[in-house]
Amino acid sequence: MSTEPNCIFCKIVRGDIQAVEIARDAETLVFKDLNPKAPTHVLVIPTRHVTNLGDFATSATPHELGNLFALAAKYGREASPGGYRVVVNEGPDAGQTVFHLHLHVLAGRPMSWPPG
């Protein structure tokens, strides 16, 4: 697993920063968002450092890619059988502020459209 020394999510993966972990395996970590935007708001991240979805999609194995999205679906469905939202921001113009790929899984309240 490769991590970046100054990446906040890599620090969480390494245990340098505490987070409320929901699940972890060798490739993926699920934890509660520190600043939730819905009653359920978890982040699903690869345990290796990768900047964004575009980079991950071209470098990940099919298993890594599937595992990331399978865990997002699992925790979304568990939180709200009536529906949930998965958000991935890529780049500053899309609102990405932490440059380590992360999927936001939001549930527990009605979601409006368009987002943002």
Image (cartoon, rainbow, N blue to C red):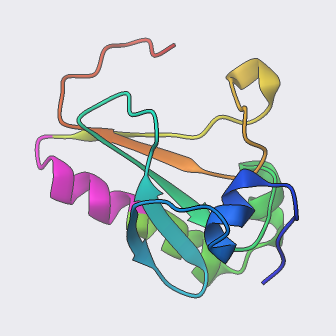
Q: Image height check: is 7 above or below 27?
A: above
Relative depth, front residue between 16 and 42: 16
Q: Quadrant of the N terminus?
A: bottom right
Q: Position of residue 32 (x, y in %)?
A: 40, 52
Q: Is residue 28 left or right of residue 95?
A: left
Q: Is residue 93 left or right of residue 79?
A: right
Relative depth, front residue between 8 and 102: 8
Q: Position of residue 5 (x, y in %)?
A: 88, 64
Q: Residue at x 70, y 23 (%)?
A: 94
Residue farthest to the left, as pictured: 82
Which quadrant holds residue 84?
Answer: top left
Q: Residue at x 71, y 64 (%)?
A: 11
Q: Residue at x 51, y 13 (%)?
A: 116
Q: Position of residue 80 (x, y in %)?
A: 15, 46
Task: Residue 74: say if magenta.
Answer: yes
Q: Residue at x 83, y 57 (%)?
A: 55
Prevailing SS of the magenta stretch: helix
Residue farthest to the right, as pictured: 5
Q: Image height check: is 40 above or below 2?
A: above
Q: Which region shows up in magenta?
A: 72-82
